[in-house]
Every structure is written in C-alpha cells, then in structure tokens.
C-alpha cells in the first residue's frame, strides 16, 4: 500500500512538471510574438501574404485626330479633252470637324480655300456646295487620262468608271498659318465622254471604174455630229474633202446633216477604191461584182474662223458594186 501511494504521488509530480513546462513554452512564444510585432524589420505572416504583387492592366483610349473632313460621294460627267472645271456635277456638302485652337479657313493646298469662322477651338462646320472639281484640281491630268484610256480600251463613246484620290486638307489661322492637316481617301464617279462623235450611216454605191467617183450612183446618208465640249462650233469638216455649215453653237450639241454625200466624204480614198474595184473584177474575171472598201475618215468641228475645236476619226465601211 505504501508503495502504490508513493508511485501515485510521483506520477502527479511528473504531470505537474509537464504542465509547467508547457506554460513556460507558451509564455515564451507570446513574448517572442510581441517582440517581433514591435520589430520594424520583421513582417508578420499575414502581411507577408498580402504583399504579393498582382499584374496591373492599363487601358489607353485611341487618340481622336484634331481635324476630320468628310466629303460625300459624287459623280462627274467628264469630256477628256476639256478642263475638269467644265465637267458637269460635283457640288457636295463638305463637313469639317476640328478640336483644337481657333481657325479661319479650310484649304486643299494647290486647289482651293474656303473661309470659315473664325471659330474658337472645337467645332463642326458644313460648307454647302463644295466643288469636288476644284478639290481634285491636282488630280485633273490623271482623271482625263483615265477617261480617255477607258474609252479607247472599250472602243465606246460613253462609259462609267471611277477615280481614286487622296485629298490633303488643312485648317489655317487668319494669317494663313497651318494648325492641323489630314488626308481624305476619296473615290469620285466618272461618266466619260469623247469630245466629238461622228456617225455616218452605211451606204452602197454603184461605181464604174472608167468614171470619176463623183459620178457613182448612190451615196447619200444621214451624218450625225455630237459635240460634248464647251467651245463655239460653226461647221463640221472632213479635211481635204468637204465642209458642212452647222450654224452657231455654244457648248454641247447634236445635229444631223441629211443627205451627206459619201462620194465627197471619201474623195481622199478615190484611188484606193478604184484599185479595189479593178483588182476584184480582174481576180474574179467578172464585169460586175460586189465588194467593200474600209476607210478611216477624219472629222473635225470648227469655229467660225476655221479653228479646229475638236476632232475624231470614224471607221467606215463603204459598200461597192463595181463595174467595168
């Protein structure tokens, strides 16, 4: 009994010793934490977790140009040998939007200038009836060449096409100083026309190779003259052959000459027509035979003083009944 009692007391003493040691350890830990909290060189665990860097995203707005110009689409009717200013059409509303200091005009360098304002910084203004023909002055040669080449390539008298241009704009102060510039990509529609169109109706003549061409039977046809230019025209001519008076015309017109004489129109081709008939008759050993003669007939329209206003060449095929 005394032994058991002694063993129990020893166990209680060990337990109390362990509890005391644990209390001392806890106190030491709390003391250490308090000391670390007071130490500026030691970062608490919670704060160390929050200090981890996160990626930042920056949003940048696209800059708005200080000068914006809007030119609406239009279509011009162009005669390729006339100045672009003679073209029909081309008036559009031109809108200028500007977000910077005061200005007094908008310009297309080398072409034109429109006075506006003076406006304080930041405005939008529309110029009514801005002339695209003037805006495209620096493109005039390319436009005329575009029309001529397109007409020739397609072998037509009238055709629709387009011209692509880049138009430079500036806004200027009252002293002409340039405040801002921009370039406007622009496509203009074109109806291209030849300056002069001449049409001679088909005919067939009866030609005796022993007589002058002027004695051949037949050959009277309607002769249609269409002029698309802006000049003064008084007559139509086939150089070296004949001339028909047209009356006084200012600018574009169309006129039909009744009973134009193809024998006179083709006077310059008389030797070639005679050779054609002779050769065809002899080759076929015939006294009468039908054939044709192909000709290129130069035609001009002229002013009252004889000055050539416009010219063209007419491809023509003449029917022939050749006789010995």
Image (spheres, grey):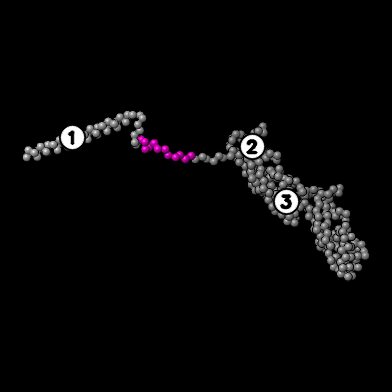
Majority SS type along the magenta span: loop
Decide: few, some or many residues near mark 1? Use Cα within 10 Å; few <14, some 14-19, many ≥20: few
Q: Quadrant of residue 34?
A: top left
Closer to the camera in the image, 254 or 2: 2
Residue 171: numbered disc:
2
The image shows residue 214 at horizontal and vertical percentages of 90, 61
Q: Residue at x 71, y 54 (%)?
A: 159
**Camera-nearest label, 3 or 2:** 3
Residue 176 in view (yes/no): yes
- Circle nearer the N terminus (2, 1): 1
Q: Quadrant of residue 271?
A: bottom right
Q: Is residue 107 rendered magenta in the image?
A: no
Q: Residue at x 17, y 37 (%)?
A: 15
**Dot 3 lies on which element?**
helix
The image shows residue 58 at horizontal and vertical percentages of 48, 39
Q: Is residue 56 rendered magenta in the image?
A: yes
The image shows residue 278 at horizontal and vertical percentages of 89, 65
Quadrant containing the C terminus in the rendered view: bottom right
Question: How far is disc 3 from disc 2 in space, using C-alphas?
Answer: 32 Å
**Camera-nearest label, 2 or 1:** 1
**Stretch in magenta:** 47-58
**Dot 2 lies on which element?**
strand
Question: Quick check: 177 above or below 241?
Answer: above
Q: Left of 88 or right of it: where is 307?
A: right
Quadrant containing the N terminus in the rendered view: top left
The image shows residue 11 at horizontal and vertical percentages of 14, 38
Q: Which residue is label 1 attached to?
A: 17
Q: Which residue is label 3 attached to?
A: 147
Q: Left of 281 or right of it: where is 183?
A: left
């Amino acid at each position: 009994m005394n032994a058991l009692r002694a063993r129990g007391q020893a166990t209680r003493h060990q337990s109390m010793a362990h509890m005391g040691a644990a209390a001392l350890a806890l106190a030491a830990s709390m003391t250490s934490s308090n000391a670390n909290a007071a130490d500026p060189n030691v970062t608490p665990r919670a704060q160390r977790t929050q200090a981890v860097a996160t990626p930042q995203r920056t949003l940048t707005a696209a800059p708005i140009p200080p000068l914006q110009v809007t030119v609406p689409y239009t279509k011009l009717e162009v005669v390729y040998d006339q100045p672009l200013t003679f073209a029909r059409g081309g008036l559009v509303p031109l809108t200028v939007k500007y977000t910077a200091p005061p200005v007094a005009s908008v310009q297309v360098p080398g072409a034109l200038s429109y006075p506006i304002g003076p406006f304080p910084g930041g405005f939008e203004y529309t110029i009514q009836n801005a002339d695209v023909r003037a805006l495209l002055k620096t493109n005039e040669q390319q436009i005329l060449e575009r029309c001529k080449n397109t007409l020739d390539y397609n072998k037509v008298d009238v055709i629709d096409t387009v011209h692509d241009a880049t138009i430079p704009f500036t806004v200027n102060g009252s002293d002409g100083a340039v405040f801002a510039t921009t370039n406007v990509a622009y496509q203009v529609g074109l109806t291209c026309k030849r300056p002069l169109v001449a049409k001679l109706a088909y005919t067939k003549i009866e030609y005796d190779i022993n007589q002058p061409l002027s004695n051949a039977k037949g050959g009277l046809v309607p002769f249609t003259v269409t002029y698309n230019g802006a000049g003064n025209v008084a007559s139509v001519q086939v150089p070296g052959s004949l001339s028909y008076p047209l009356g006084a015309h200012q600018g574009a017109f169309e006129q039909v000459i009744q009973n134009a004489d193809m024998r006179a129109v083709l006077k310059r081709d008389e030797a070639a027509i005679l050779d054609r008939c002779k050769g065809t008759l002899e080759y076929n050993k015939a006294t009468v035979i039908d054939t044709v003669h192909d000709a290129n007939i130069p035609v001009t329209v002229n002013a009252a003083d004889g000055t050539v206003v416009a010219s063209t060449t007419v491809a023509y095929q003449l029917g022939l009944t050749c006789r010995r």
